[in-house]
Image (cartoon, grey):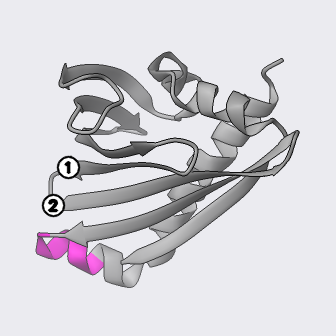
Amino acid sequence: MKYTCEVDINQPVDKVIALFDNPDNLKKWMDGLQHFEHLSGEPGQPGAKSRLKFKMGKREMEMIETVTVRNLPEEFSGTYEMEGTLNTIKNKFIPISDTKTRYVTENEFQFDNLMMKILGFLMPGMFKKQSMKYLESFRKFAESQP
């Protein structure tokens, strides 16, 4: 399953990149994130691995992030692996003006168990809705920064 999401942020691209690229900011905008732990490699660089733990309602999830491409602002890509799912995300930051940036994500989900395949087939909108929730949350966070 593939889809693209985008949001315009009222901040210059350099500011948006600085906010996005700082792992200390993740908990400020990524709803449900409980813990971010660097595991290996140079943080933020291709090959780096980190563990992210989320709590969504009563459900807890853990995923492993692997950075695959770092060429900001044009691209920051990674894979996110969790039980039954591999999510590949390509983040792009496009300057619209001196004070506005378009944040675009290209998302691809691959499912390796029957339950997740059924969920992806029956409810693809749920995945896009969650992705848009994170983009909107990041936009609000970025725009609140001086």
Magenta-drawn stretch contains 114: yes
The residue located at (34%, 21%) in the rendering is 35
User: Residue 30 location, x and y as percent?
Assistant: 52, 34
Secondary structure, mark 1, is strand
Distance, label 2 to label 1, CA atoms, is 6 Å
Is residue 91 a member of the stretch shown in magenta? no
Mark 1 belongs to which amino acid?
Met
Which residues, given as a range, are shown in magenta?
112-118
- The image quarter containing residue 118 is bottom left
User: Which residue is found at the position 23% from the left and 32% from the top?
Assistant: 48
Label 2 residue SS? loop
- In the rendered image, residue 126, in percent from the top left (x then y), is placed at 48, 67
Q: Residue 94 at x, y = what percent?
A: 69, 53
Mark 2 crowdedness (10 Å alpha carbons): few <14, some 14-19, many ≥20: few
Give above or below for 27 relative to 96.
above
Which residue in the structure is indicated by mark 2?
A: 84
Q: Which mark is residue 141?
A: none
Chief secondary structure of the magenta portion = helix
- Where is residue 109 drawn, in percent x and y? 31, 68
Mark 2: amino acid: Gly
Question: Which is more toward the observer, 115 or 17?
Answer: 17
> What residue does disc 1 label?
82
Is label 2 in contact with label 1 (beta carbons under 8 Å)? Answer: yes
